[in-house]
């Protein structure tokens, strides 16, 4: 049976990242095991370099990068990069309102001028009309789900015909791990020694602070990745084996067992674990939604039929359920009314 994040997991994301956002904004230490304000600035700059490389490769392969939707965006650095360096407009989204708020600060740090449209939403219930977005992307997000499959189905619903979903920097499950403890991002002295000898990778797992707050930190087998990716019609997968970073690329040619690297590579992946990314395309059958303005692609997250939203001054309104979705400090709160109550007004 397919499983989705529980409200407990989502509430963990919201509450943990609320305090972590303060750590990145104010410089106070709330979580010693997590990056400091200074460390996070460097992380974001490094990610910009990586994302520039990814997007440049996609563009060279004639992949249409917009209008785009960034999922699990954090401070929205991927979207800001597309807006400012690639000249493409779109949306950035996260379930954490407080993390999205940091985008203004990081826009200054990165010396960017333009901002995407920012929305607080749930990736299982995207506030977009079907067949509306040509390019959806995410980095380091899918491992917070118990199973990528249900989310992939929602991404495909929103993708325009012929559109692409791209993800990268996700883990492949490592079978050989004693899992003695969870470690933080900032390692303790003995963990640094164990990391240097590579032993740490076989006896512990990352994500202590997140797991302590009921956030999921999962790794998925090749079989589960294959099942989830089969939602799409055309897929190219790129894998790397830890710690060698040797690239393995495979393209979907059949319905089953298409993610099947040579025996020795599969064995190394199972022993050491690795990373995975993929470019997934939706069939060109059907008609893409065409609009004059980006906000016309939005849909009501409280209605199952996903009717379009109407812009009213600085908010959005649904004629069907009569819900109003307000702009709060430059971020549109586009969670369903029930979910917004559970996550933000307890």
Image (cartoon, rainbow, N blue to C red):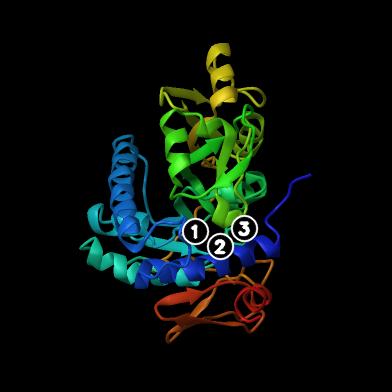
Image quarter hosting the C terminus: bottom right
Quick one: 334 or 342, which is closer to the camera? 342
* Residue for badge 2: 129
Residue at horizontal 24%, vertical 58%?
A: 84
Residue 58 x/y as whole percent? 35, 39
Examine the rendered structure and indicate whether residue 235 appears above or below residue 67: above
Which is more foreground, mark 1 or mark 2? 2
Which is more foreground, mark 2 or mark 3? 3
Q: Characterize the local packing of mark 3: few (<14), some (14-19) or many (20 or more) Cα atoms within 10 angstroms.
A: few
Mark nearer the N terminus (2 vs 3): 2
- Mark linked to residue 255: none
* Residue for badge 1: 289
Q: Characterize the local packing of mark 1: few (<14), some (14-19) or many (20 or more) Cα atoms within 10 angstroms.
A: some
Examine the rendered structure and indicate whether residue 182 appears above or below residue 242: below
Quick one: 57 or 132, which is closer to the camera? 57
Residues under numbered marks 1 and 2 in contact, where contact means CB atoms less than 8 Å apart:
yes
- Mark linked to residue 212: 3
Mark 1 vs mark 2, CA separation in Å: 8 Å
Residue 133 appears in view: yes
Element carrying mark 3: helix
Q: Characterize the local packing of mark 2: few (<14), some (14-19) or many (20 or more) Cα atoms within 10 angstroms.
A: many
Which is more foreground, mark 3 or mark 1? 3
Residue at horizontal 46%, vertical 49%?
A: 185
């Amino acid at each position: 049976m397919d499983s989705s994040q529980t409200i407990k997991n989502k509430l963990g994301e919201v509450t943990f990242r609320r305090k972590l956002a303060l750590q990145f904004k104010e410089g106070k230490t709330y979580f010693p095991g997590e990056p400091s304000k200074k460390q996070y600035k460097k992380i974001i700059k490094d990610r910009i370099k990586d994302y520039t490389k990814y997007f440049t490769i996609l563009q060279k392969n004639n992949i249409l990068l917009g209008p785009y939707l960034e999922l699990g965006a954090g401070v929205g650095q991927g979207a800001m990069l597309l807006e400012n360096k690639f000249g493409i407009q779109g949306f950035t989204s996260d379930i954490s309102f407080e993390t999205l708020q940091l985008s203004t600060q990081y826009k200054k740090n990165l010396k960017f001028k333009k901002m995407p449209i920012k929305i607080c939403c749930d990736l299982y219930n995207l506030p977009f009309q079907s067949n509306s977005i040509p390019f959806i992307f995410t980095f380091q997000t899918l491992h917070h789900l118990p199973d990528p499959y249900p989310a992939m189905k929602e991404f495909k619903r929103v993708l325009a015909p012929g559109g692409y979903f791209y993800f990268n920097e996700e883990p492949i499950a490592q079978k050989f791990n004693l899992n003695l403890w969870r470690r933080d991002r900032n390692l303790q002295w003995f963990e640094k020694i164990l990391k240097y000898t590579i032993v740490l990778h076989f006896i512990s797992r990352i994500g202590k602070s997140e797991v302590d707050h009921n956030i999921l930190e999962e790794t998925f087998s090749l079989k589960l990745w294959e099942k989830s990716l089969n939602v799409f019609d055309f897929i190219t997968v790129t894998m790397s084996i830890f710690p060698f970073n040797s690239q393995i690329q495979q393209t979907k040619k059949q319905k089953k067992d298409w993610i099947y690297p040579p025996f020795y590579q599969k064995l190394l992946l199972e022993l050491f674990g690795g990373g995975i990314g993929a470019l997934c395309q939706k069939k060109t059958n059907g008609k893409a939604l065409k609009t004059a303005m980006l906000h016309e692609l939005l849909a009501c997250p409280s209605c199952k039929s996903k009717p379009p939203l109407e812009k009213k001054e600085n908010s959005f309104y649904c004629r069907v359920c009569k819900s109003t979705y307000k702009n709060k400090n430059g971020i549109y709160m586009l969670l369903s009314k029930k979910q917004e109550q559970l996550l933000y007004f307890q």
